[in-house]
Image (cartoon, rainbow, N blue to C red):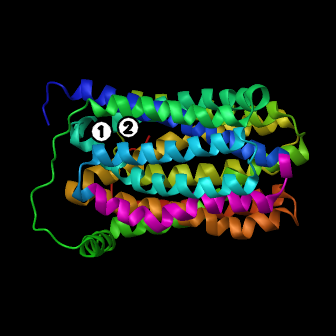
């Protein structure tokens, strides 16, 4: 990696990915709100989550193998193009009058496959550009950019859905993905992994799994991530339905829910960018999980919509802190030739935990109040964070925030 142009490369890469993220998140919000307003059904939301996440589970490990074998740049470009093409077809079907919730589910499967291939390559490519001592700061800046765009995309998604129709919300992803691919096309990346003997993709996959679970730290990280994402699921996916049922069906309420979460994330990302480094990243992750548990539980007892929004905004602060700590921890401790596969395993755990959780929490949300589900899952999440905090003492020492 050339030390004299890493900043320029970093800016261009973050630009390409955040342009694409904006369109993808706009579509995601539009689809969630469309289904919420059309059905107000936990079962339909469960089906959407299964279609959006389960295909990633099936292809994520192979995505990690590809990211460690081939050019991560072209993997990202091809996957982004694949997702954009599927979304374009969805828009065309809706314009022709053949739109349906089942069609959305089918295209969500296709988009999920592309994301499963793309995500490990995106996470693994930054160490090819950024010096090690700058990884935390750059990841923090990226989280801030993510949060800024996530602040805009709910409003943009709500406006597109309300005034233009869901077809134009779909087209936003096509346009932004095309721009992101164009920026990435003109970038050069140096391959940092050493030349190695050609072997089967299955052997590469077995090596990645063995490498991850030989490391006590990575093994525990995977274990707690699985538990945590399972328990985060109700707050992540059922709160729009809770808002519609408990506070009102207006689109502005759903938009406000996403905006306050994103404002909190923006503040958290700005803090990470200012901080620049965490001495004890394992402890940071544990404390963020505790904070999530407490705030998500409080969502279940919010007396009014204003109190709900305040709590949701506070919860959002911890997202970029936790994601940055986890990402940099892996980027610093894992060999570059294994990064794609390790990130794919982490991604697989998160992606599989949520649909499995929705199989339980989604139907349950049609039987009991979602507030009770948030109270129970929040309490268990805080407990998981406390136990991970105890484990963190075996590793890094020093201040965490």
Q: Secondary structure at mark 2?
A: helix
Quarter where residue 257 is shown = top right
As drawn, 67 above or below 185: below
Residue 317 point in image, percent of width and height: 57, 37
Residue under label 2: 139
1 and 2 marks in contact (CB < 8 Å):
yes
Is any atom of residue 148 visible in this view?
Answer: yes
Q: Is residue 126 left or right of residue 152?
A: left
Q: Secondary structure at mark 1?
A: helix
Crowdedness of circle 1 by 10 Å Cα count: few (<14), some, many (20+)?
many
Residue under label 1: 135
Quarter where residue 67 is shown = bottom left
Residue at the location (71% across, 46% down)? 32
Measure the C-alpha gap from mark 1 to mark 2. 6 Å
Residue at the location (37% across, 53% down)? 120
- Tell me the magenta residue range: 38-67
**In front of the other: 152 or 265:** 152
């Amino acid at each position: 990696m050339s030390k004299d142009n890493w900043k320029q490369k970093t800016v261009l890469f973050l630009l390409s990915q955040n342009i694409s993220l904006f369109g993808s998140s706009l579509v995601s919000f539009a689809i969630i709100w469309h289904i919420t307003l059309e059905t107000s059904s936990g079962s339909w939301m469960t089906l959407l989550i299964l279609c959006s996440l389960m295909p990633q589970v099936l292809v994520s490990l192979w995505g990690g193998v590809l990211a460690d074998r081939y050019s991560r740049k072209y993997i990202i470009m091809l996957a982004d193009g694949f997702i954009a093409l599927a979304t374009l077809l969805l828009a065309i079907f809706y314009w022709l009058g053949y739109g349906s919730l089942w069609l959305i589910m089918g295209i969500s499967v296709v988009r999920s496959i592309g994301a499963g291939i793309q995500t490990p390559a995106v996470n693994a490519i930054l160490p090819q550009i950024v010096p090690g001592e700058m990884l935390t700061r750059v990841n923090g800046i990226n989280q801030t950019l993510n949060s800024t765009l996530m602040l805009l995309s709910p409003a943009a998604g709500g406006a597109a859905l309300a005034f233009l129709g869901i077809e134009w919300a779909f087209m936003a992803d096509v346009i932004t993905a095309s721009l992101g691919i164009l920026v990435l096309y003109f970038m050069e990346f140096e391959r940092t992994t050493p030349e190695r003997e050609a072997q089967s993709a299955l052997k590469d996959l077995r090596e990645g799994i063995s490498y991850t679970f030989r490391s006590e730290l990575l093994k525990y990280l995977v274990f707690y991530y699985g538990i945590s994402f399972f328990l985060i699921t109700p707050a992540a996916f059922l709160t729009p339905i809770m808002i519609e049922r408990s506070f009102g069906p207006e689109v502005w309420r759903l938009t406000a829910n996403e905006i306050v979460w994103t404002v909190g994330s923006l503040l958290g990302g700005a803090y990470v960018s200012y901080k620049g480094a965490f001495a004890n990243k394992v402890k940071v992750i544990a404390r963020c999980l505790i904070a999530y548990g407490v705030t998500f539980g409080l969502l279940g007892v919010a007396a009014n919509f204003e109190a709900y929004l305040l709590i949701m905004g506070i919860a959002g602060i911890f997202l970029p802190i936790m994601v940055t700590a986890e990402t940099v921890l892996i980027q610093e401790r894992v060999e570059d030739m294994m990064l794609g596969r390790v990130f794919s395993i982490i991604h697989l755990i998160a992606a599989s935990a949520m649909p499995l959780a929705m199989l339980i929490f989604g139907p349950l949300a049609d039987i009991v109040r979602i507030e009770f589900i948030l109270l129970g899952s929040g309490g268990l999440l805080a407990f998981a964070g406390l136990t991970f905090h105890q484990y963190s003492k075996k590793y890094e020492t020093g201040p965490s925030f």
